Each structure stands twice: as C-alpha cells, then as structure tokens.
C-alpha cells in the first residue's frame, strides 16, 4: 500500500530546545512509520541568518545528531541536507518567475523584520518560495508545522495551484499538520519558546543547564497554580496526573519545579544516550546523509524533468 508523503525541515541554527522537539521532532518520529517521510536539514535557509562557514558546518552536523538522538530511524526516513539536492534552487528560480513581489511581501517573517526597522536580505524575502520548492519537490501531502509556520505551507499551496493552473497539473497540494496541544510551546517566561527570546529549556543540555532553565521559570505569586510551570509540565505528563500533583503541592512552586525537572530529565536521558552513540560514530552519520541525499535527489530529478517539460525547458 502506498504511503502518503510527509516532509519536515529543520534549520541548523543552534542547539534545539524542548519547543523544537514537541513542535517538530516528536511529530517526525511519531509519523515515520505512517508516512513516506523526508527529514531535511535546510542549510540554504540558514544562510539567511548565518554568515559563518564553520558555524554552519558544525550546526548542520549537530542537528543531524539531534534528529537521530530524538529517535529518527534512517531506515524509515530519508534524512538529507537541502544543499545536497541542487534541484531545490532550480525549482525556486522557476517559481520566482511565477510569483509576484507584492505576494511575497505578505510573508510574516519578512514583515516582522522590516516592521522592526531591520534590513531584510533577499534570501529572507524569498524564503517562502524556497520553502515551497522544498515541499512541492517531493509531492508532499503533509507538512508538520507549528502555528507560526502555517502561512508558509499555505503559500506553498498557492504556488502549486498557480503553477498547475498555468502549466498543467504537476504538483500535489500540501496540507499543514498542526498538533494543537503543542502548536505553541511556552518558554520559561510564558512567551513562545524561542532562542531569540532566550527563554528555552535545552533538549540535549547537561543536567546543570536544564536545571538552571527549569528553576528559572517565571511564576505568578498571585495564584496557587504556577501557570508557566504547568503549561510546560503537561507536555511530559497527562493532565489527570498533574491535577493530583498540583493539588498536593498547591503553592509550593519550588517542589513543582523540581517535579517538572525530574520528568524532563527522565524524558531526555534516553535521547541524550542515543545522540552520544551517533556522535561517537561519525562515519555512520556521514553514510546516513549520503544515502539520504541519493534517495532524495533521485526523486527530485524525476520531478524536475516533469517541471522542465511543463514550462518548456526540456
């Protein structure tokens, strides 16, 4: 039986936090048996913000270790680097000749940056088109994302529709897959967990780093239930279990933070051990990426032949 195709991309821009895990990694691991799954390290996307070659290389390797540590099975998932499949940039150019600048200027990431008075590079402006190429290249049907990335999938769908209407049916129309209970993972200050807000709990951090983050969660002393602690805790335990615990420890914020810390450490320890195994076997990691790129590019070449024929390049 043919499986539906799912694609998810992750930027190599630093150490992952539990928001990254529940927002993307967990879904990728959970769905790898159900879908034909592509896991892509989007290093071209990272170039919009990373201008250090050594940092990009190290971050790219680290994020592969992170995904493998999180439970991604390379026998089930096509794991590869975006830059190892040059067809992505070729398809982006073709899409660029189809979409308009006013349409692109709607993108949240671009608007957020320019509204803050920051200068956006062309790569950031064109980010949604490259993302559309990433998604549509593999006739992707499902894209697991957080709510903040929903617009990019919508834009990819619009690109596919415009191409199909212009040149004939070529691309599948992707759908976003949003896990509502973790659509936005809160940080230790109650805002969305993000490296840019410096409010994260590191996924593969040391015990000391995780402890510091958890004990630093902002609490509201006016209530009996620490909202921020509870919002994070329910990612690791059922609300039925938590209700009893939080009633027993009512008003005891330190005890509740320690309970959360215990649950987080128990949860991440097996992943840290898996990650350490792959870190000790770099040749195995390199082979996984090489094999993944070979499989991804084979599919990309087939799709690009279809695209070139459709637009008149073949």
Image (tube, helix red, strand yellow):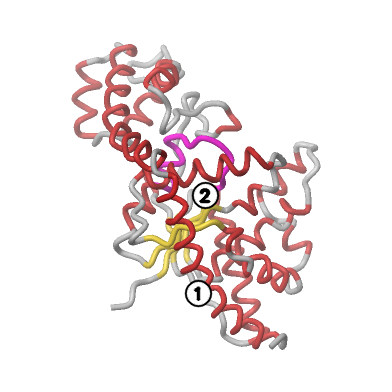
Pointer 2 residue: 10
217, above or below 107, in the image: above
From the viewer's side, name the closer residue of 161 and 143: 143
- Residue name at image x 33 percent, y 60 percent: 75
Disc 2 versus disc 1: nearer the observer: 1
169, above or below 78, in the image: below
Q: Which residues are magenta?
A: 10-25
Crowd tier of the residue under label 1, counting other residues whose Cα lies within 10 Å: few below 14, some 14–19, many 20 or above: some
- Left or right of 3? Residue 163 is right
Marks 2 and 1, how far apart at CA: 20 Å
- Residue name at image x 38 percent, y 47 percent: 68
Instruction: Indicate the position of residue 4 as horizontal and vertical percent values.
Output: 38, 71
- Residue name at image x 31 percent, y 27 percent: 265
Can you say which quadrant of the picture contains the C terminus?
bottom right
- Residue name at image x 46 percent, y 62 percent: 292
162, above or below 143, in the image: below
Q: Picture quarter containing residue 114?
A: top right
The answer to whether any part of residue 248 appears in the image is yes
From the viewer's side, name the closer residue of 33 and 53: 53
Instruction: Indicate the position of residue 224 as horizontal and vertical percent values.
Output: 33, 16
Q: Helix or strand or loop: what does disc 1 sit on? A: helix
Label 2 close to label 1 by CB (< 8 Å): no
Q: Helix or strand or loop: what does disc 2 sit on? A: strand
- Left or right of 198? Residue 276 is left
Pointer 1 residue: 299
Can you say which quadrant of the picture contains the N terminus?
bottom left
């Amino acid at each position: 039986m043919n499986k539906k195709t799912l694609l998810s991309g992750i930027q190599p821009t630093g150490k992952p936090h539990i928001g990254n895990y529940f927002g993307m990694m967990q879904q990728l691991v959970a769905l790898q048996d159900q879908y034909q799954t592509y896991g892509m390290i989007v290093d071209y996307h990272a170039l919009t913000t990373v201008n250090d070659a050594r940092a990009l290389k190290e971050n790219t390797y680290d994020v592969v270790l992170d995904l493998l540590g999180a439970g991604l099975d390379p026998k089930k998932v096509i794991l590869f680097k975006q830059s190892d499949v040059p067809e992505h940039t070729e398809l982006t150019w073709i899409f660029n000749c189809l979409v308009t600048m006013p349409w692109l200027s709607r993108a949240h990431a671009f608007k957020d940056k320019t509204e803050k008075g920051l200068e956006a590079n062309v790569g950031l402006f064109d980010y949604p088109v490259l993302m559309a190429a990433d998604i549509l290249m593999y006739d992707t049907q499902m894209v697991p994302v957080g709510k903040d990335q929903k617009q990019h999938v919508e834009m990819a769908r619009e690109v596919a529709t415009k191409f199909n209407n212009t040149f004939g049916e070529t691309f599948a129309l992707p759908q976003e897959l949003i896990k509502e209970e973790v659509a936005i993972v809160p940080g230790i200050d109650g805002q969305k967990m993000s490296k840019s807000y410096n409010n994260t709990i590191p996924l593969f951090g040391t015990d000391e780093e995780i402890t510091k983050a958890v004990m630093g969660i902002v609490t509201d002393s006016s209530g009996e239930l620490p909202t921020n602690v509870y919002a994070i805790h329910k990612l690791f335990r059922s609300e039925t279990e938590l209700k009893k615990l939080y009633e027993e420890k009512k008003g005891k914020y330190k005890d509740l933070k320690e309970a959360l810390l215990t649950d987080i450490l128990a949860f991440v320890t097996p992943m840290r051990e898996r990650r350490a195994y792959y870190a000790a076997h770099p040749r195995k990691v390199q082979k996984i990426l090489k094999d993944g790129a070979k499989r991804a590019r084979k599919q990309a070449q087939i799709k690009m032949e279809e695209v070139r024929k459709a637009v008149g390049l073949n």
